Image (tube, rainbow, N blue to C red):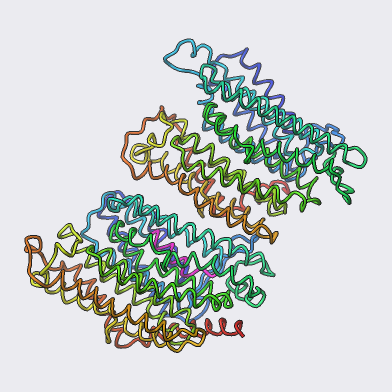
Amino acid sequence: MIPVLLIVIPLVSGLVGFLIRNEKTARSWSLFAAVVTLFVSLSGLILHKEDAFLSADVAWLPAMGSRFSVALDGMGQVLCLLTAISFPIIFIATWRTPYKNARNFYALMLLSQAGLMGVFLAMDALLFYFFWELALIPVYFLCSIWGGEKRIAASFKFFVYTFLGSIVMLVGILWLYSHTPDHSFSLKSFYALRDKVTGHDQLWLFWLFFIAFAIKMPIFPLHTWQPDAYEQSPTATTMVLSAVMVKMGLLGLLRWLAPVLPLGTWAWGDTVSMFCIIGMIYASLVAMQQDDLKRLVAYSSIAHMGLMCLAVFATTQLGMQGVMIQLFNHGINILGLWIVVELIERQFHTRKMSELGGLAQKAPVLAILLVVVALANVALPLTNAFIGEFLMFSGVYASAVTRYNVVFTVTAGISIILSAVYTLNMIQKVFFGNTNTLTEKAKDLYPNEKFVLIVIVVLIVLIGVYPKPVLDLTKETVDTLLTKMATATK
Amino acid sequence: MNAIIISAVWGIVMMFSGIFTRNKTSIRYLAIAGLIVLFLANILDLQGHHFFPVHTANMLFFDTFGLLANAILFGATLLYFLLSARDIENVGVKPTDPESVKAGVNTAEYFALIFFVLCGASLVTTFNTLLMLFLGIEIISIPLYILTGSDKRNLKSNEAALKYFLMGSFSTGLMLLGIAFLYGASSQGSFFIDEVAAGRAAISPLFIVGLLLLLVSMAFKVSAAPFHFWTPDVYDGAPAVFTSFMATIVKAAVFIGFIRLFGESFGPTQVKWQLFVAIITAATLFIGNLTAVFQQSVKRMLAYSSIAQAGFMLFAILSLGEIAKQGILLYAAAYSVATIGIFAVLIKMKDHSLEGFNGLAKHHPVLAFTSTIFLLSLAGIPLTGGFFAKYYMLLSVVQTHQFLWLVIFGVICAAVSVYYYFRVIQAMYFKEGEPQTLEIPAGFNGLLILLAIIIILLGIFPQWLLNQLSDIIYL
């Protein structure tokens, strides 16, 4: 019931959005739809715990063994909630940004939300693949039509990368499907396969899936689409890309790869972890060199996602819990950063840090709120990211599946220090120091912007102080996941 | 049998209709009516109402697969007529040149030739002996040579026709030779496709040579590499309306014949020739996709893309299962509808190059939107029929548990294909320009939307097409 609504509301409201003539109405309509989705998502969290309420299963393509099967598990709850929160925040934060053909813009945004919800909810491999691609198409158009100067090339690179990854994954899905005894795409049948697929097959099947997920996250060296796409997209789309869409890769890893091919995951763990580590250090170093705010945040995101992927391959209870909570935290924190970037860009028409400075004097509220978000990005205690990253570090350190746990922990730790360097450097350059001719006339926040940033800051502190509800929510997912991975390795 | 006789008779009727009336509109309606009759008669045939109880001595075999294929072919042709019949009238006519206006009034003959092609196609989909296959292929080919050269005052069209004729007759010769070899190799001397395969305990060289010759000539007809060289020139040189017909309905029909022939006659000896087909497939995918990337003319790009699409359809020949047979029907439908649609839009454009599409979305949103759906379908993006078509092809090969390298190679090529299909979308939506179009007749937009809806329905419920048709059978 709830999962179907989560997909249908944005889908239908998006399609209706194309028909609305008035641009202001279109904007209000999409905000309304996004808020309704948020309430549905919250009600799924609070009201019921019955399965029938949290899942739906209808015949779709009976002859092919594929069903329209969607369900909310712990991880799904977290990700759907993140998606549901993100869109109202994005709409409110960019309320004043003018878009030409705004109705198409908002409609496409809602369609991408529907696609994302579908990816997080699908319990059928073919359905999963369907939504995986569908989330991509609206974003491609959003970026290509409303993006920056080099938008066409950047969004096309993004599209081809993702499409290549996903179609290779399709081969993997088909291979597994053709080996299921009951010829079914359901997640259950795939899980039942894991003892039947030999270790040898798992070794290469792993990459068919992992490449798709690694491109999405993105993991070094498949990350090259990401800074360009983030930079060139309109900021509202960048928010969707970085806060929600990258989570598709992790979800795929956690739901469709690690439990289905545990031997492959285990065997390639060190290799992948190495790529994660290299990516983290590399991205942090590049981030330090950036002058463009968008590129800085983009590279910082690569580093954070690398840590999450590393923690997944450590296969420990703590680490997985950390990943689960960080799925949500990373989305919230990066939204905060993008909102600030968007504010600065709209006011000064530049994103170059070297051209800014002294904003704190002119916009004190903005400065305070940004500092909190930035500290969360550095994972300072009492912020939400601290909980997540602490758990992940403990998990990686305690990992029993790799011999290099100490090396991984230490190197990853260095990247966190580097993240403090570039984040604080950014704050210093943009907000402190002397004002210049450009920032002299800076205005502080409008009420709508203040509202969303305060929501984000409250969430950051709240989860930082009391993370238990999120941890409880995902505990079951983590436990089943680890059992599935453990039983096959024995 | 209904389809074969009605299409032949209607072809003759069309031919002589030119004597009684010079009115283009009535000729067009006559053709469309004929196609509707043909389509319905074929459906009735599926239900078991045979109008013409002809004793074919088992040389034709009307199974559900063949008749379903006919239904798809006729359905696609109907859509093609509705969209592009007006453009058939204008072939070879330049409004500025009064002589060409006078000479261009061959409409009735063009329609007649198309009906003859359909007659050949329905032979190819239901043949049971190699002779009938040969007849069908020839009946398809000869009208096509004429249609290719129908733009008589255009040198490119003439060149294309001659090239097509020379190459085509050469491959027909090879096919005939192959059939002769197979006849000699069969134990009792028979043309029946199941007897060709019977008693294949020891495979004689005669049999292998015959098989390869047939493979080559069929590969030529479906423009598989390395026998594809005629395709770009012919598709580019022929009037765009007829390219659309050749690239879709004709190609699909030959593929149906291809899979029928190889499934029935050479299924038991699959291991012997599978590698050949795999190599041909890989080469076709590679050459088709790679060359399409570099094209500046949309028409030529579509010619190469049709080679690339043929590469995907060859997956069905490679695997030869139930899934492959279902898949090829779905592929034929999805690919034909999308290609007919995109060609219909292309014909309306004055400039066939990529720049000609710049800014189309602003000036003709419906054309641009529907073309986007057609292109997405050709690229195989989910929610379009093209996705399930590709899905079936990939699945059929994956299920053989062999040739996984080919599958991976195929999907990489599919990713490459995104490049050239999306270039058109980029031109239409993201670039500025003043696209010049011909006059767009009333109802054209509506038909394009209908095509787009068909594609999306195929993309959500691919079973819909097959079930719908099989429901009719069991009414």
Q: Position of residue A61 (x, y in %)?
A: 61, 60
Residue at horizontal 37%, vertical 54%?
A: A155
Is residue B266 placed above or below A36 in the rendered structure?
above
Looking at this view, name the residue that lies furthest to the right.
B188
Who is closer to the viewer here, B148 or A421?
A421
Residue B353's image quarter?
top left
Residue at horizontal 68%, vertical 52%?
A: B324
Residue A136's image quarter?
bottom left
Q: Position of residue B262 (x, y in %)?
A: 75, 45
The residue segment tinted magenta is: A111-123
Is residue B112 placed above or below A280 in the rendered structure?
above
Q: Position of residue B309 (x, y in %)?
A: 58, 44
Q: Is residue A336 magenta?
A: no
Q: Main secondary structure of the magenta part?
A: helix
Is residue A99 placed above or below B154 in the rendered structure?
below
Q: Position of residue A60 (x, y in %)?
A: 58, 61
Is residue B116 placed above or below A71 in the rendered structure?
above
In the picture, the quarter occupied by the C terminus of chain A is bottom right
| B174 with respect to B330 (left or right) | right
Residue at horizontal 48%, vertical 39%?
A: B448
Q: Is residue A119 magenta?
A: yes
Tag count in the figure?
0
Who is closer to the viewer here, B44 or A473?
A473
| B221 with respect to B357 (left or right) | right
Residue at horizontal 87%, vertical 43%?
A: B195
